[in-house]
Amino acid sequence: MDIQHEAQAGGSRAWTLVVEGHFWLSNDGLAAHAGGLPTGWDDELLCTWLGEEPIGVLTYRVVKADREAVVTLLYVEPSSRHTGVAKALLAALVARATQARLRRVVCEAHVDNAAFVKLLEVVGAKPLARLFALEIPSG
């Protein structure tokens, strides 16, 4: 599986897929808990391609003080899901983190995103903490 790395946000088709991923998360309500879209312009990107089309993206940022790579988005085109794309992207990030001598890769998984939670369990991720939210009433 061809996985390419881009150091900063730009005009590539891979970054277009990032925008699509954010749109999908927003429509499913999975981005609302984070206060918006998590990917920033300083994030790095790993992208999987099928021919000349991006089919999966993983964005992350390195937190040097904590020696962590923090996943900010993992998105796979619906037609390419359950084919190993997400697992390959996570493996590529783990390899980059190992090479950079980071101590871990951190992901936040929304409780309603059962497929991502299962993927994280399959690749051996362990929960670090439980995240709670106090909703603020509108009006």
Image: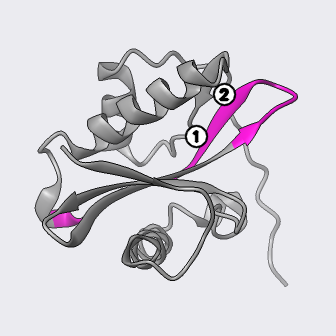
Rate crowding at label 1 as few (under 14), some (14 to 19) or many (20 or more) other CA atoms within 10 Å: some
Position of 91 with respect to 127 (left or right) is: left
Q: Nearer the viewer, residue 103 or 31?
A: 103
Residue under pointer 1: 108
Q: Is residue 26 above or below residue 4?
A: below
Q: How far apart are labels 1 and 2 at the CA level?
A: 10 Å
Query: Which residue sits at x=35%, y=41%?
Result: 89
Residue under pointer 2: 130
Position of 16 with respect to 106 (left or right) is: left
Tell me if residue 70 is in the magenta stretch: yes
Identify the main secondary structure in magenta.
strand
**Stretch of the chain drawn in magenta:** 62-78
What amino acid is found at the position of numbered circle 2 in the picture?
Arg
Q: Position of residue 68 (x, y in %)?
A: 70, 28
What amino acid is found at the position of numbered circle 1 in the picture?
Glu
Q: Position of residue 74 (x, y in %)?
A: 43, 52
Query: Which residue sits at x=51%, y=46%?
Result: 110
Residue 116 visible somewhere in the drawing: yes
